[in-house]
Amino acid sequence: MNRRALLETGLAASSLSLLAANNAPTKVIDAAVHFYDPTRPQGVPWPSTNTPNLYLPTYPDRYLAAIAPYKVDGVIAIEASPWLEDNLWLLNVADKSPLIRAVVGHIQPGHPDFSSALKRFSKHPLFRGMRIGGGLVSSVLSQPAMMADLKLLSDLDLHLDILVNEPPFQPVAELAAKLPDLRIIIGHLPLDSPRDAAARLNFVKGLEACAARSRVFVKVSGIVRRIDNRVSTNASDYKPGLDQLWDIFGADRVVYASNWPASDMTAPYPVVHKIALDYVSSRGPADTEKFFWRNSIAVYKWKEAA
């Protein structure tokens, strides 16, 4: 959906400004934003040239332009590149922007330089953890050296982001059980519940197993999607999946995130934010404050900008 389509839904700029003021939390921390620059001499491993609307220099100024008329007080910058040196590139960007409250790095468990790199990066006050793909979790569980790498995260008071595009969730729950001191956040949720009854039951049991571990949180960064070949801007269309997350994890372990600019592939930021706000504000101001910023402190331990 582009901005012209947004206007065609009736959400004109003046209406959005009014919506932005209604039921708004006192603060917003967006816990999944990507910054990168394809024009660098070395280029970028993500995104690809096949996504021209993403394959652009993407810095905090572009994000701030994209979120209008909404206001965001800070972001958690997620490094999507597997190149080790790109962790330093993102930290350098963060040093120049008070918008970035924390950086989540990308170091592959099992990498020969994992321990030394993590210890080095963690000396930077904005480096608060790292991300892996959900498909890697089963491999980590079966390899003691990779488990030791992730244990180092908790030893350094860092967290682990896990990107889960599809179930099962049980390996994440097992990892959390084996590393009980590690803070884990799962994104990008909610996922579509399987149609098959047995698969759906397994899906819910996996989420419940994760929720049974008190240090597991969920990143609500996958709300907006295509339903019957169209993108709905009505929060009620996403309510079942969102209700499921709140019912299973509770109001203290759900964290707001946009997944920008990847979210632009589905809908512009104002649509993503408005749907999240419409849903959560219906749960009352206390839950709204927790969702939009308070809960993110428990995961990322970010600090106010100087």
Image: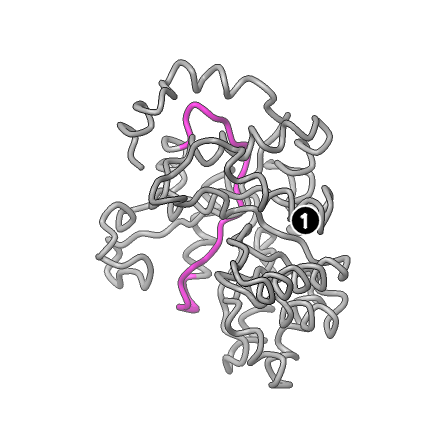
Helix, strand or loop under label 1: loop
In the rendered image of this protein, does residue 4 appear above or below residue 253?
A: above
14 and 118: which is toward the camera: 14
What secondary structure is the stretch in magenta mostly built from?
A: loop
Name the quarter where the C terminus is drawn. top right
Q: Residue at x 59, y 60 (%)?
A: 129
Q: Is residue 299 above or below residue 142?
A: above
Q: Amino acid at mark 1?
A: Lys
Q: Nearer the viewer, residue 295 or 306?
A: 295
Query: 302 or 221: which is nearer to us?
Result: 221
Q: Can you see residue 122?
A: no
Q: Which residue is mark 1?
A: 301
Given residues 120 and 267, the one toward you in this image is: 267
Query: How many labels, in total?
Result: 1
Question: For residue 201, which quarter of the picture?
Answer: bottom right
The magenta segment: 67-86
Please give the name of the residue rendered at 41% of the width and 68% of the height, measured from the top-left corner: 82
Which residue is depicted at the point 69% across and 65% down?
156
Tell me where residue 228 appears, x and y as whole percent: 37, 44
Which quarter of the picture shows residue 159? bottom right
Q: In the orientation shown, which residue stands out farthest toward the front?
A: 197
Q: Is residue 82 magenta?
A: yes
Taking the magenta stretch, the answer to whether it contains residue 1 is no
Q: Quadrant of residue 295?
A: top right
Give the percent coordinates (x, y) of residue 76.
53, 47
Q: Residues within 10 Å of mark 1 (few under 14, many from 20)?
A: some
Colour convention of the picture: one colour
Q: At which x and y percent is residue 72?
A: 52, 32
Task: Note whether residue 28 is visible.
Answer: yes
Coordinates of residue 230 in the picture (x, y in percent): 35, 40
Q: Is residue 300 above or below residue 155?
A: above
